[in-house]
Amino acid sequence: MLAGTIIEEEYTPRQNAVLEEALRLLVKGGEKALTTAGVARAANCSKESLYKWFGDRDGLLSAMISFQASKVRTSDVRPDALTRDNLREHLVVFAHDLLEVLSGEVSLALNRLAIGQASREGSKLGQLLQERGRLQVGRRAGALLEAARLAGLLRFDDRDEAYGLLYGLIVTDLHLRLMLGADARALKPEFSARAERAVGAFLTLFAKT
Amino acid sequence: MLAGTIIEEEYTPRQNAVLEEALRLLVKGGEKALTTAGVARAANCSKESLYKWFGDRDGLLSAMISFQASKVRTSDVRPDALTRDNLREHLVVFAHDLLEVLSGEVSLALNRLAIGQASREGSKLGQLLQERGRLQVGRRAGALLEAARLAGLLRFDDRDEAYGLLYGLIVTDLHLRLMLGADARALKPEFSARAERAVGAFLTLFAKT
DNA sequence: CTCTTATAGTACCGTACGGTACGGTTCTGC
DNA sequence: GCAGAACCGTACCGTACGGTACTATAAGAG
């Protein structure tokens, strides 16, 4: 189980523009629409350049994931003075942000792409998406939970376990339904209530009396 | 938002055998390995028969989902005398069953297939899998929760909402990780502890004092 | 025995895609 | 102004797949 360190690759502005266009194509038409010729045509570049920059199609897919992840830097909120209501608010904001990220078009498209590719043995796309996305978001929540524990507001033994339950309470099966094709726009109005409900349940479970 | 009723199609034993072989191919090699020629070769039938029976490739995929769903009939446990410990045990069994189903090879392969297909607009595979799988399992849990509420053991307003939280507590992000390629065998030993933890949290939230 | 039906096996067709090669053009450094 | 690199656009190639057509074979009906 080698823990391959993920290389932080940087691309030129031109290459970033190409990756942006590739993401647009992917969001619009799924993996089927993401052909090398299609990307080249949409981005006004040559196929030869694509292969020179990204190696092959898989390299392009990996680059798209890295590029998107590099754009979505999690705003590392630093909670100095955590109070009870304060914590609740922070958690609700986090829940809402998580729901917004997961239901985003690009996120959904990339997750679908990586999942469709997961059957092939040598595909690292799943691991890549996992490390780039989940760990990023999870770190933010983990820091918040840890700070709340230090402030004497929460009680839990295992931070990852607590975060796992928080995640489950927030997301439930919504992510799966979205990836199976549920209409995101029809579900977004529900996000606020969902976030409140999840945070309420989480505090019932872990708030220090 | 038309709620198309799903037709309960039945297939001949020969066709069932072909679908079984197609599922084997899908599990082994993903959607890429599921070619019409490959299915015909593996199942010792002609491509012409495939198209006669299932229409086209999409019809074959739909038939595979229906076929698999028809095999996994949920054992509708009828809880006559629900006590407090009884309920906890029933919930743990349900949680464990749910985890086993979601981590099953065929389930994962079909979910990956439907998700990969979800980008195309006219694809009903996602809806099909949703209705066949989730509703089936959810109905079983819903009945259990409703019985527990009638027995005065649980308190909740919205049954679906309560079930949603139960689902989230049990599954968290495990399903996503599995679909992204995480090793199911490495995670299965954790299922018992995960089920216990989830049910404990759920009862903390909803058990009548 | 013969006609019909169903199906396996194979050959075939059109298309689309991944990847490569090449000519022409713009940009850069000197 | 010039040499070289980078790059666009397009043409090309091999392959693989979805779908169709055709032949042969076997089973059942009359």
Image (cartoon, coloured by chain):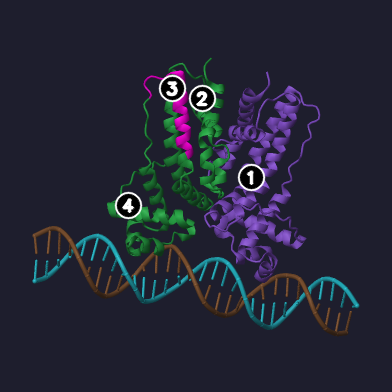
Chain colours: A purple, B green, C cyan, D brown
| Image point (44%, 59%), residue name | B34
- Foreground: B124 or D16? D16
Q: How many marks?
A: 4
In the displayed structure image, the side of residue A35 where residue B33 appears, left or right: left
In the displayed structure image, the side of residue C3 where residue B106 appears, left or right: right
Position above or below: A48 against B61: below
- Kind of residue at disc 3: Asn
Residue B167 visible from this viewpoint: no
Chain letter belonging to callout 4: B
Is residue A181 rendered magenta in the image? no
Residue at image mark 3:
B86
- Kind of residue at disc 2: Asp
Residue at image mark 2:
B158
Q: CA distance from mark 3 to mark 1?
A: 42 Å
- Residue C24: quarter of image: bottom right
Q: Position of residue B191 (x, y in %)?
A: 51, 37
Query: Magenta stretch?
Result: B79-99
- Kind of residue at disc 4: Asn
Residue at image mark 4:
B16
Q: Are marks 1 and 4 in contact (CB under 8 Å)?
A: no
For discs 2 and 3, the disc positioned in front in the rendered view: 3
SS category of the residue bearing label 2: loop
Chain letter belonging to callout 3: B
